[in-house]
């Protein structure tokens, strides 16, 4: 199955999505900041990224991560 990365500061959403995706056989990695997502992506590229674009510390951080990917 797929390796999915969820990048979201809302841990409740991320955990709920992880539960659904892992029950379908996918491997899921949760990152709560764009910076931690970039570090992780340098080691392993995900097949799919579920990305929140609005983060409290920087309203553009999600968009910047999308451009960097």
Image (spheres, grey):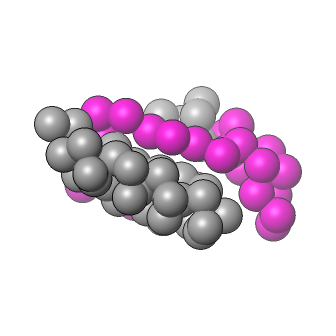
Residue nearer the viewer, 65 or 51 = 51
Q: Is residue 13 above or below residue 48?
A: below
Residue 5 image point, x, y percent: 39, 49
The answer to whether residue 31 is visible is: no
Q: Is residue 17 above or below residue 31?
A: above
Which residue lies at the image location 84% right of the left edge and 51% below the top edge? Answer: 59
Q: State the residue at coordinates (34%, 47%).
A: 21
Tell which of 37 and 19 is nearer to you: 19
Q: Which quadrant: the N terminus?
A: top left
Horizontal placement of 21 versus 30: left or right? left
Q: How many tags in the picture?
A: 0
Position of residue 46 in the picture relative to residue 67 (left or right): left
Please tell me whether residue 47 belongs to the stretch shown in magenta. yes
Query: Residue 45: where, in percent of width, then height?
Result: 27, 41
Q: What percent of the width, then of the height, locates residue 67?
A: 60, 31
In-front residue for pair 58/25? 25
- Against 23, residue 1 (above or below) is above
Residue 14 visible to an observer of this rendering: yes
Specify whether residue 41 is painted magenta. Answer: yes
- The residue lying at 40 percent from left, 56 percent from top is 18
Tell me where the magenta segment starts and ends, as one range. Answer: 39-64
């Amino acid at each position: 199955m797929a390796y999915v990365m969820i990048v979201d500061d809302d841990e409740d959403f991320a955990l709920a999505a992880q539960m659904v995706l892992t029950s379908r056989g996918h491997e899921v990695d949760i990152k709560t900041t764009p910076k931690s997502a970039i570090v992780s992506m340098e080691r392993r590229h995900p097949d799919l990224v579920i990305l929140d674009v609005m983060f409290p510390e920087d309203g553009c951080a999600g968009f910047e991560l999308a451009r960097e990917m």
